[in-house]
Image: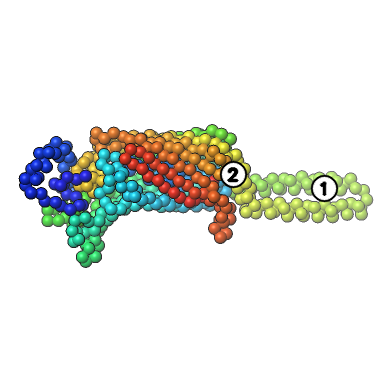
Amino acid sequence: MASPSQPALGPRVKYPAFLALALFSLSGQARADDPPPIRSNDFTLDVFQGPLLAPLRVTGLGGAFAGYAEGVDAIASNAAAPAVREPYSVSFIDCDLSFSFYLPSAFKSTDFDNDGQVGFRYDNFTFLTLGASLQIGRFGMGVLADFETYDLSPHAQEKDPHVLASLGKVHAVAGWTLLDGQLSLGGGVRAVILSFDATQPLTGTEENVLAMTGVAPEIGVLIRPNWQPFRIGATYRMAVEGKPAGEPKPDADGVVRAGELVVPDRVRLPWEVQLGFALQVGPRPLNPRWIEPFAHKSRVRAQIQEERALREEGYQAELSLIEDEVARAFRAAELADEEAKLRERENERLTDESLRGERRARYWNWPRERITVLGEILVTGPSENAVSLEAVFSQVNKESGGRTTITPRLGIESEPVPDYLQTRLGTYIEPSRYAGRAARQHFTFGGDLRLGHWGVFGLAPHQIWRVSGVVDLAPRYRNLGLSIGAWH
């Protein structure tokens, strides 16, 4: 919490001189240890998210997803994820959507950025994730973006402006699979978007005080040998530097402000290296070979043509043994009728819907029992002359990101009740970006419960639905989430 002498969002209280002197004498040591207030724009915003705010499956596994790297939710964990075909993928063209919504500000007694201070310096905080991916054969591309919105409503006078801060992080990547799907390579860009908007309560005039954007590349790889029980994944992301777009307007003191907030002159997403693995035990395969639909159809057609040739050879051999012409003609008619029925069934099998059904049955006929262990290390680079977003809101020059940090993660997923219940257990150690602050360990718990079939009014006739939940617990932190989605 900011001291009375520090600029803050709350009311400015003026103490009589003797009272201020008494308070100083009683708490002089605490004040001496307090960080100084932010007085100029010459600092960097260090964008680092310690607690997991991710899709529920990722959170339930403690964030250890770089070595699994399947689906649109994995784009933020591994840049090669859009190219990786899921075992339940049965079409040449597939698409996937993702949506998550969090309200962490519902837990007011939370030390969100692990700086030792409990509570928020704002009224409302929302976290929204949107994602989409498209796969065409061995090629895939996807976008995953998360947006944080902070409602910095005034607490002093009614004439004070209403400030809204928004922070967005975007991954836009594409990839290709090689070696029969055993190697996936991906790359693209990572972007950061920061904006401060102020609305004057008396006039309703809205002004964009500050807007920053920055972009930098990222690359990823996933190794998944067919029919083997392990995967290895890695991603490297370059640091993203964002600077103001246009010329911000300073006040009479030469300082750019959003309401009472002194805003940064640059924003930085530090560089990252993410290394992970997945290991699965049990009868269920982790890395089944993906059946490419056109190749599947070609194989079935070739098989049918071979069977037809063999049948024709057998027909001729049988007819050659019949000496009576009338009997031979009668038998030939019978064989032709049988052949027509067989060909009708074979032609139906060659339809795209029938072949998709075969591939779908292949997936659902696999055994469900398995235990999957996932682990990873996330290394995050430093940011110079930087403070956290919480420090900006508190207006204290408390250094953040001065050193490289390491986040180890571990998760276990299983299906104790086959085809009805999946469970997850995870843990990760969240480092503090503040000097002198200790890391804290999180424990995560999650699961999926199968609900049943619903074809969405014929739009998804084979869809099975599930309800999911997750809990993330740590000292001075707790979060929970619920969702409804597809059961696989």
Q: Secondary structure at mark 2?
A: helix
Identify the residue shown where x is 20% and y is 52%: 10
Residue located beneath label 1 in the image: 315
Identify the residue shown where x is 39% and y is 52%: 101
Q: Secondary structure at mark 1?
A: helix
Residue 211 is at least partly visible in this image: no
Residue located beneath label 2 in the image: 363
Q: Residue furthest bottom?
A: 203
> Which x, y percent locates residue 243?
25, 50
The mark found on residue 254 in the picture is none
> Which x, y percent locates residue 241?
28, 46
| Residue type at tag 1 | Tyr
Q: Residue furthest left?
A: 18
Work out whether residue 218 or residue 426 is closer to the camera in this orientation and state it.
426
Apparent side of residue 335 relative to residue 29 in the rendered image (left or right): right
> Which x, y percent locates residue 34?
17, 40
Apparent side of residue 397 relative to residue 452 in the rendered image (left or right): left
Apparent side of residue 328 relative to residue 263 in the rendered image (left or right): right
**Local crowd at mark 1 within 10 Å, few (<14), some, or many (≥20)?**
some
Work out whether residue 56 or residue 467 is closer to the camera in this orientation and state it.
467
Residue 352 is at least partly visible in this image: yes
The image quadrant of residue 217 is top left
| Residue type at tag 2 | Tyr
Choose the circle earlier in sequence order: 1 or 2.
1
Work out whether residue 189 or residue 61 is closer to the camera in this orientation and state it.
61
Total numbered badges shown on the rendered structure: 2
Identify the residue shown where x is 50% and y is 45%: 448
**Local crowd at mark 2 within 10 Å, few (<14), some, or many (≥20)?**
some
Screen quadrant of the N terminus: top left
Identify the residue shown where x is 84% and y is 55%: 333
In this rendering, the label closer to the viewer, 1 or 2: 2
